[in-house]
Image: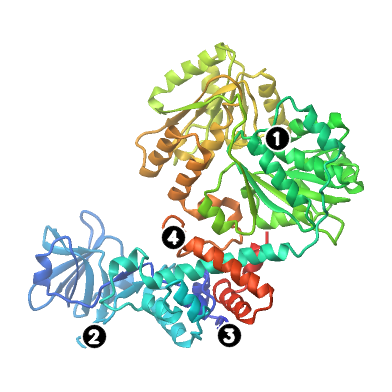
Amino acid sequence: MPVELPSPPAKSKLAANLAKLGLYSDIDLVLHLPMRYVDETQLITIQRAGSLGGEMVQVEGLVTACEVQYKPRRQLLVTIADDSSQLVLRFLHFYGNQITQLAVGNRVRARAEIRHGFFGPEMVHPEYKVVNENTPLPVQLTPIYPSGVGISQTTLRRVISAALQRINWQDTLTPELRDRFKLVEFDNAVKLLHNPSVSTDMFSLENRSHAAWRRMKFDELLAQQLSLQRAQFSRRRKSAPSLAGVGKHTTAFLRSLPFALTCAQQRVLEEIRTDIGATYPMQRLLQGDVGCGKTIVAALAATQAIDNGYQATLMAPTEILADQHFRKIAGWLEPLGISVVWLTGSLKKKEKQNARDQIESGTAQLVIGTHALLQDNVKFARLGLVIVDEQHRFGVDQRLTLRNKGNDLNFTPHQLMMSATPIPRTLAMTYYADLEISVIDELPPGRSPIMTRVIDQERRSEVINRVGAAAADGRQIYWVCPLIEESEALQLQTATDTHSMLQEALPELKIGLVHGRMKPAEKQTVMADFISGTTQLLVATTVIEVGVDVPNASLMVIEHAERFGLSQLHQLRGRVGRGTAASVCLLLFQAPLGGIARQRLMTMRSSTDGFEIARKDLEIRGPGEFLGARQAGQAMLRFADLETDQELVEQVRGLAQKLLEDATHNLPEASEIVEAHLLRWMNRKEEYLRV
């Protein structure tokens, strides 16, 4: 099946401006689809336009006056007239060349809503073009494209039109597939979207429900699924150490636990054990709500790797979280005779070298640390299992670097990624099709429910009194602030100022302060005091968002909660409710609230279900923001919408799997479809998806 190849980019200013939009080849231009359309096919007289206040209209006339006025503010006023009447075009922001374009005597075609101003009907900031008497009206709807600085709509239309003429229009899908999924032909769909006729339903174009849009969405989703699933197929052809045996360390660890695993933990542990027992590398995402017990499952997976003679490593995004993991897991495993080593950037030079020596010699059986694990001079003797906590905070390249740390070039270590940000099912199916996913959907018994209240900043004194009362009852409290420096633009209370204010208001309390600018050793000291109970109130920035586990902490105050995302708020709230005492989270906000901020806070108040919160977060932010660091190199969806196109996701997922299976069995038609489709849509960007 012939396919189009990218045209080499021309070395010009235009090419540079197109490159800023990600447009390098003909197919890039063809797939740069309009975001909306305007109807420029009809002209009405100025007199009639003046009677249609509030409607979008297009008029044409000669410029009879053009002047810059300075009262009440600098603005450009242009008067145009036709045989019926005259109209003012008002520009509150303008460039010098517009004065030349709109000079007296020029003929102008302008389009906007008519308003009735002091001097009669006017258009404010209309779309306009300079024409002559013989300039024909368009016969089709005019596309408006996503654009950028230095490139006009006229230029985009010209270069896209030229690309449409040059492109090879071979359809990547067979007639049988198009019939099965009720799809229009690709070339017809693209041409219609770039040049729709006046009779085309504008509503279906702009809400992307038109059959032409459906074809674009289907193809985009299919390319993504083929890329991710092919990465999974490729992974299954690699070799990994089989870690099937459950040995003495794992057995002893389970016996030493003072509690029984929940049913969800047991189920997930069996899924992981099955994967790491295979001879191809596991690529599993372990997700679950805050406090569901992911760490114990990860530790059990590590002991199984150690039982089979291999090393395991756990990487966390912050030193506070890594320190929490080290303290907890070392406390579990070192009494069993397992060597647990700690490696972070804050260690002294001699301590780092000692840790690296133990890792390279194999003496270190489990290594816990931060990004320091990624350094070139860190080498493992027999790395069998890589665990990445809060995986969305690491880029694709970082996870690959850690996975490639083993000395045995014939093996790829198994990889377990963990996230306390639950991923909605449709999003997981679309963006994580290359992973197996395990879900811990059950909290351990004895966890107290968390009551959430949304409180205006004006009631701060009441909140401070509540903090004092909680401390008097022997409870510990978090007070979270979003900044550590003053910012006049955002007018947010800083952590340092809040710490001083609370010390003054509650002098009887021992109050700690922790933020990202502190040295690691200082942070560890502050956190150790809070964990031990020496500190009653901890003022912090979001460095305590994940990993901090203090069962006696039962009150969380989040300052300027309207500035945080839903996922962050849920993570922060998860620092309390870890003991048996009733826990409360107070969300302080600064009025007035914007629409999105109000949605977030109301969601937090009404739900403690991480999956429901994640679904709402996806709805508010969209997949690009939701996925965080994973999007480094990730092909984000431009056309498909995961809320409205779930049916397409289901169809495409199954088709991609069937095509890849057939291609694996050397069926030529399937192989041609896969290669042609990926070339058209991914343009050789697939390597970024191989995580």
Amino acid tagged 4: Asp
Label 2: state its secondary structure: loop
Amino acid tagged 3: Met
Left-right relation of 313 to 163: right
Residue pointed to by mark 2: 136
Residue 370: image location, x then y, percent: 73, 43
Residue 645 disc label = 4
Residue 18 disc label = none
The answer to which quarter of the image holds residue 403 is bottom right
Q: CA distance from mark 2 to mark 4?
A: 39 Å
Assign the N terminus to one quadrant of the image: bottom right
Residue 104: image location, x then y, percent: 19, 77
| Circle nearer the viewer, 1 or 2 | 2
Left-right relation of 544 to 75: right
Residue 519 disc label = 1
Label 3: state its secondary structure: loop
Lower sequence index among marks 2 and 3: 3
Residue in the picture at 56% in, 15% down: 471
Q: CA distance from mark 3 to mark 4?
A: 29 Å
Residue contact at pointers 2 and 3, CB within 8 angstroms: no
